[in-house]
Amino acid sequence: MARAAKAAAAKKAGEPKIQIGAIPYRHRTDGAVEIMLVTTRETQRWIVPKGWPIRGLKSHEAAAREAMEEAGLVGEVGKKSVGRYTYWKRRTRDFVLCKVRLYPLAVKDQLPSWPEQDQRRCQWFTQADAADLVDEPALGTILRELKLA
């Protein structure tokens, strides 16, 4: 998106819209951390599972729900946000500025089927590769620097 178009969209959009996201992770037998990324439905870019807040759920619970819907992942979600980043969400006719709060999800299992299984790809990556594959620089920095016990 051209700089002028982003500036015009930001002026029109006002405050950024809030989204929540999960950073699904697991530890390999050698102790290395892997992070699961999913693709966007439209452009097939690699991202973390994320979406809009869900009425009746706390932010960390909504992040876990997004990971289940987008990648079939279940596990223990952290109650404290581990980072935030801002990005431009592409919509049908325009762009909207979104601020995403991220919550860690220690993955225990992947369901045999899930709601968006036919709309996205999902794959485990090393922490460094996941950081390199996402387009948003701030998200890449968060993934690269995050200490996951």
Image (cartoon, grey):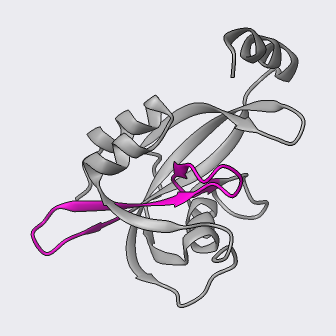
- Taking the view exactly as shown, the residue that stands out farthest to the bottom is 112
On the image, which quarter does residue 57 sit in? bottom right
Residue closest to the eye, 18 or 98: 98
Q: Which part of the image, by quadrant, shows the N terminus?
A: top right
> Can residue 8 be found in the magenta stretch?
no
Residue 83 position, x and y percent, is 45, 39
Q: Is residue 121 left or right of residue 90?
A: left
Residue 101 position, x and y percent, is 56, 43
Q: Residue at x 61, y 66 (%)?
A: 120
Q: Residue at x 69, y 78 (%)?
A: 115
Q: Residue at x 29, y 41 (%)?
A: 144
Residue 89 position, x and y percent, is 71, 38
Q: Is residue 148 left or right of residue 140?
A: left
On the image, which quarter does residue 96 sit in? top right
Residue 7 position, x and y percent, is 74, 11
Q: Considering only vertical position in the picture, is 136 above or below 55?
A: above
Q: What range is drawn magenta here?
A: 25-50
Q: Residue at x 53, y 33 (%)?
A: 85
Q: Is residue 60 left or right of residue 134?
A: right
